[in-house]
Image: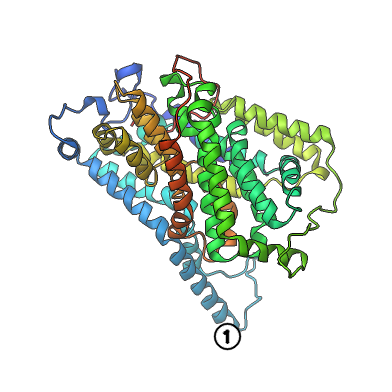
Amino acid sequence: MRTLPLLSFVWILISSSVFAAAGHEPAYPNLAGGEVQFASFPKPLETYAPSSGGVMQTIKARAAADPFNVAATIVFLLAILHTFAAGPINRLAHHYEHKHEEQLRLRGVRDELHPDGVAEVSFKATVLHFLGEVEAVFGIWVLVLAGVAVYFHSWNDFVLYAAEDRVYTEPLFVVVIMAIAASRPVLRFAEAMMAKAAALGGGTPTAWWMSVLVIAPVLGSFITEPAAMTIGALLLGKKFYHLNPSPKLAYGTLGLLFVNISVGGTLTNFAAPPVLMVAGKWGWDTLFMVEHFGWKALIGIVISSVLYFAFFRKDLFKLSDRADGVEDGVLHAAPWAERDHPIPAWVTLVHLAFLGWTVYTAHFPVLFIGGFLFFLAFTMATGHHQNPITLRSPMLVGFFLAGLVIHGGCQGWWIEPVIKALDDQALMLGATILTAFNDNAAITYLAAQVEGISTAAKHAVVAGAVTGGGLTVIANAPNPAGQSILSKYFRGGVSPLGLFLGALVPTVIMYLCFVFLPNGSAKEHPVDAPPAIEQVVPNP
């Protein structure tokens, strides 16, 4: 039964993809690179008439060529605004929930159950809770996009677009990698690694805070960023957030985590989605990434973390005092070791093997989903060494990313001319800003479609995309996972403005590192990129 939600999700995606295009001729059968697009929207970028004017003239011409473009972007902007309203909607939901409970008390039926054993609930409060769930926002607005698509094109076109032209490998991958990374053996293994670093600071919440924020992002270059985000967020919740830090420290830590994870995957050419979008086409191997991006990211991570430690030093010491009862501000060891039975090494190794298999086969859903089913069977056979495998959070994150894939595929009409119109310096700043409003992998993918782009421009767009990946929940694919895990520690959920402010300083630091630190000597050359996450926006 535990596999039923995942299997249902997979079946919907796979079955729709298999049958949607049956009997239908592609609307665009001969696109560049041999690509095929079945739906009549969005109009492929290469089919627009060349524009001799500036970027605004190009955007106006494309809007006139297909008014659906404007409508789809308005829907996307409304969905983004909805994410900002999620907190107030949740507070309103709690208000109606409490009001409903008060009415039940007045009626004397507080604990009364219906004949089927289900307690009476408030329909209004439940609906508002759903509307206030950040992970559900983009999925909700897909319904509006569907109506817009039917109005300007047809229902059949929307079905073909959503089921055939979009690629959902990344959402599926994130669901699986989150579930495996959150398993007890994997989490304990990562915790043991970081405990050695935390021990240097006495094992206090402050030491754990620094250890997780520096080490987890670097792990992202090898186990992928979604897995690193899952591990980092779970450990921060266990070692830090449960002590109820001040809102300023809580949001500062969240923003720092998101930025560090976004840039921490640049030590390899397969772990960060925005890097993966261009690595194969531009010939960027792992050595190239280390020499041009990775070492700068490491310096930025350390500088940002040390700066935040210095700024929040008093608040962090108070948390340490609260944890161990010491009031003198001196860091002392805290008894973090849990008193439960140890996990055999062979069980941990099997879990790590499943994690490695998922990363290695991340291009192929049939392989990593099949591996995940074997993983679930293994956890049942070793249940006394496991925590329950919960799929609620991974499924919500997958739903969020799937919605973003659908909306993001309709935004290339205006993003591409903006990218082409900027010079190298403006391009990095533009990519950083655009990333806050669209998944950074989509930004780099669109840049990879621009012919004749210079080496400096390539560096600028990727550096900007990973730099801005912590500013919003939608800026980087792993962010929804971190938000889902840690939102319970924020009253009313994570505030988009609070996250933006918390991530702003680390973003500026990373920006300066990528701008002013020199590049390495590795040269671009054609390579076969290692298996990693599938392209998010194959046909913008």
Residue 10, can we see it? no
Specify whether 379 is left or right of 54: right
> Which residue occupies the foreground of this view, 365 or 241?
241
Residue type at mark 1?
Leu
Q: From where the camera sits, is residue 197 visible?
A: yes
Q: Whole-percent x and y of residue 399? A: 49, 45
Residue nearest the observer in this picture, 118 or 415: 415
Name the quadrant containing residue 345. top right
Residue 464 placement, left or right of 62: right
Describe residue 135's horizontal placement relative to residue 388 as left or right. Answer: left
Vertical side of 475 occupied by 159: above or below: above
269 or 359: nearer the eye?
A: 269
Residue 125 position in % (x across, y down) = 49, 68
Residue 229 lies, in percent from the top left, at: 59, 43
Q: Residue at x 44, y 57 (%)?
A: 501
At mark 1, the secondary structure is helix
Residue of label 1: 106
Residue sitting nearer the eye, 112 or 439: 439
Q: Quadrant of the C terminus?
A: top left
Q: Determine the residue located farthest toward the left in the rendered image.
A: 52
Quadrant of the drawing holding the N terminus: top right
What's the residue at 51%, 26% (across, down)? 291
